Amino acid sequence: MAAEQTDALGRRVSCGEHRATVRFVGGVPPTAGVWLGVEWDEPARGKHDGCHEGVRYFTCRHPTGGSFVRPSKVSFGVDFLSAVRREYASEGDAADAEISISGRTLEWARVPERSLESLPSILLQNCQVNGPGEDGQILRTTPNVRWLDLSGSLLRRWEDVAAIAGQLPRLEALQLSFNRLALPSDPEAHRRAFRNLKVLTLIGCELTWTQVGERHGAMGAGSAAATALVRFRSCAAPPCGRCWRSSRWRTTTSSGCAGAARRRADRTATPSTPGGRGRAKRMHACAFQPRGCPAGTEVSQRVQKPPGPGQPAQPRRSAEVSRRRRSSFRNFCSLRRCRRCRLEQLIMSDTGFSAVHFPDAAPGAQTSMFASLEKLNLNRNQISEWGVIDELSKLPSLRQLWCRGNPLASADRNPRTANQMLVAKLPHLLVLNGSDVTPQERRGAECDYLKMFGEEWLRAGGRSQTSREFADRHPRYRSLVDKYGAPEEGELTKRQPFALKNQLLKITFVFADDAARTPLEKKLPASMEVQKVKGLLSRLLKVPATDLKLSYTSAKVLGPEYQMDSDLKTLFFYAVEDGDTILVRRS
């Protein structure tokens, strides 16, 4: 411990389940002895920012990110091979022990063990790896590793990562989530160490896209990881060496091993796979969680789980982007290699994402960026402007979109209307929020979109000379007019400011099948759905709501009777206005 104390400054340490970086080594009066001033990865674990009783000992990014601990209370970790042997070494002679039940001795089923040299994957999550150890030993001991998880380690420098990866010539997937790695000043010097890497996971590493972009070349131009830096979200872990002996997944709960990854693997494992039961179906990776700067996006590739011996890896070009802080595509799209990005799936849920702009494409045109992107998940973000959706319509291959949990609202504040607008604005969308968009639903959404903004379109000049402002805000409107024809004046939806006084409509209900019944006047909110209107009438007429059929006539346009044939649409959607008459019939 004394030797470690002399070289402790800047090193990574662990204290139980928590990790920190040593920022100070020395005395803290009036106490005696040596203290370590540490900056915790989780700021809530600390007590101050390095200033104690008016004396500044070190600095932290967070006001409660630092504290003092005794050297005896922390661990400086172990080298790579020590961790491997601890996690994957044989259990010794435990299997040779005799167990007797009712006088009968049980015999152990002999499962061939596999040496460390044959391991294709190693999981060392939270195993306190602090460096590569003796040069050349990793290559001699574990030369066939293709999948390596070093998440939550005590590595502190990118050079240490390169020293490990450089001794694993077949390495294709490397997970480094929840580490604090000092990036090298000369990334080109480590290019060869990552020559075969396809997936790199860096969630929770407090990196920005600027930092990654500057060191992009370190991965090599031909490396998939050079284009996609990724983060695990829900993933399945590969089989480990200890699992081979039992031919199934083994779950451990000790603090020093990859229990969480194996538990995830248990939940996603599939039986009856050649080479052992419970091979994980896939890995899903996505990008890192950046520091608090406004730049940042996260991407991933999905790959098949490490294949069997002699079988080549089959990468899938799918991407996931995720971050918990406010973000936009702006910095992501500024990366020069994005135009060549072949990602097919991108997940940006819970990222604070709110804006995107593809500067290479005018409204209604297609961008050259993300040309292969088919699936996009933007759930639970801060998207509130429809211009974001118009920008997404520039993605030429976008077919599936998830957009739940965003403050994106239509004028009537009805989520179903908002979904219709999403369908209408995205011409090639086939799946919205996990549900197929049928041709009938698309036609209905696009026709309704024409009605909703028809009056505004006419004011903007109509078909002959539509204003540039309207065309920018509704880039698909002209193509919809060409497809379905211009909406008739009686179909146009009149938009009003969202205020309670504007949303309460005075409606007269006329009972067409019962001329003797006195017409009924009610004030209803414009956001009320047709099914709720039928429910109100059902209680009044004592008939099932399903037996009622509604239509309405306008007080301003005499003659036409408009059918209200969708129970899930609102009065606002059907352009019902104050003073209109709803005709009630039995079906």
Image (tube, grey):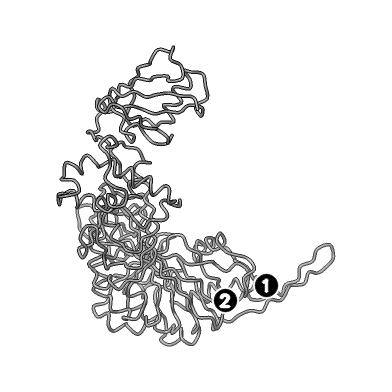
- Residue 571 location, quadrant: top left
Question: Among all residues in the image, which is located at the extreme right?
Answer: 103
Q: Is residue 584 above or below residue 184?
A: above
> Closer to the camera, 357 or 23?
357
* Percent position of residue 336, x then y: 23, 72
Q: Can residue 375 be seen from the camera position used here?
A: yes
* Percent position of residue 394, x then y: 28, 60
Which secondary structure, mark 1? Answer: helix
> Closer to the camera, 137 or 306?
306
* Percent position of residue 548, x then y: 48, 26
Residue 89: mark in rendering? 2
Q: Is residue 477 above or below residue 416?
A: below
Q: Is residue 153 above or below residue 52?
A: below
Quadrant (top left, top right, bottom left, bottom right) of the N terminus: bottom left
Q: Can residue 36 be seen from the camera position used here?
A: no
Residue beneath the point at 43% across and 77% down = 172
Residue 544 appears left or right of 200: right
Mark 2 → mark 1, Cα distance in angstroms: 12 Å
> Closer to the camera, 243 or 324?
324
- Discs 2/1, front: 2
Q: Residues within 10 Å of mark 1 (few under 14, many from 20)?
A: few
Q: Amino acid at mark 2?
A: Ala
Q: Amino acid at mark 1?
A: Ala
- Residue 479 location, quadrant: bottom left
Residue beneath the point at 16% across and 44% down = 460
Residue 94: mark in rendering? 1
* Percent position of residue 382, x then y: 29, 49
Residues at marks 2 and 1 touching, judged by CB atoms closer than 8 Å: no
Question: Among all residues in the image, which is located at the extreme front?
Answer: 559
Dot placed on the residue nearer the N-terminal end, 2 or 1 = 2
Q: Residues within 10 Å of mark 2 (few under 14, many from 20)?
A: some
> Closer to the camera, 472 or 268?
472
